[in-house]
Amino acid sequence: PRVLTVDDDPEYLEVLGSRLRKRGLDVLLASSGEQAIQLLGQQGVDCILLDRTMTGMGGVATCKYLKSSSLTADIPIIFLTATEQREAVIEGLAAGADDFVSKAAGFDALAARIQAQLRRRHTEAEQREAREALLRSDLAVLEARAANELAGMRAQLAEQLATSNRELAAANRELEKLVLTARQQRIKESVALPYGDWVHEGQLLDPVCRDI
């Protein structure tokens, strides 16, 4: 895990950094809030130790800035201070700090708080990954269901179209039969003789001989 330590006291900063490295942590050092923000723009960290009282951009202002940025908002911040006054604690927590440790509490207490924040961050990352995996799984199920429904609709439409085509073909055949029958009837009517009643056994009788 990587920890960023921010303090304007160079001696304290070096001592703290050395002891954290002996605990197996990768440590970045910054002597001001401005430098911390610059470092965080270049690489990520897992926890930030932030001195509350610094020259220039103080710890409270730095904390508010980091918690307002989407790039650093989820990084746990532990405030380091020389005082345990209630007002100072409230101010630090209100600024977005995740924990508050007095420098007088000793390194072991600080190391325990760091480990607690690292575990919390790791747990939150696992939970976030699990939620994202669940969402991806749900999305895949929904996509598969939608694809199946779409395939079913396409098959149904294809069957309906085939049925309509068959019905249309049958109707066309019936229409052709009707047209053919009508044509045949017209042909018969056009060639029928006006003396049809006088035809007997296929022979046309002369109307003059009708009364004979």
Image (cartoon, grey):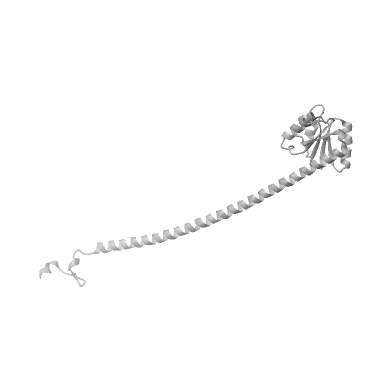
Q: Residue furthest bottom?
A: 201
Please, is residue 171 above or below residue 92 in the view?
below
Look at the image and tell me in which quarter the N terminus lies: top right
Please, is residue 209 above or below residue 102 in the view?
below
Name the quadrant containing residue 175: bottom left
Residue at 61% across / 51% down in the picture?
Answer: 142
- The one of 34 and 198 positioned closer to us in this rendering: 34
Residue at 53% across / 55% down in the picture?
Answer: 154
Residue 139 appears left or right of 40: left
Look at the image and tell me in which quarter the C terminus lies: bottom left
Residue at 87% across / 38% down in the picture?
Answer: 107
Residue 64 appears left or right of 141: right
Name the quadrant containing residue 186: bottom left
Count numbered badges in the picture. Answer: 0
Q: Residue furthest front?
A: 86
- The one of 78 and 58 positioned closer to us in this rendering: 78
- The one of 128 and 144 positioned closer to us in this rendering: 128
The location of residue 206, given as percent across then percent down, is 15, 68
Name the quadrant containing residue 165: bottom left
Residue at 39% across / 62% down in the picture?
Answer: 173
Q: Residue furthest top?
A: 56
The location of residue 178, given as percent across then percent down, is 34, 61
Q: Residue furthest left?
A: 212
The location of residue 11, given as percent across then percent down, is 89, 32
The location of residue 132, given as percent across then percent down, is 69, 47
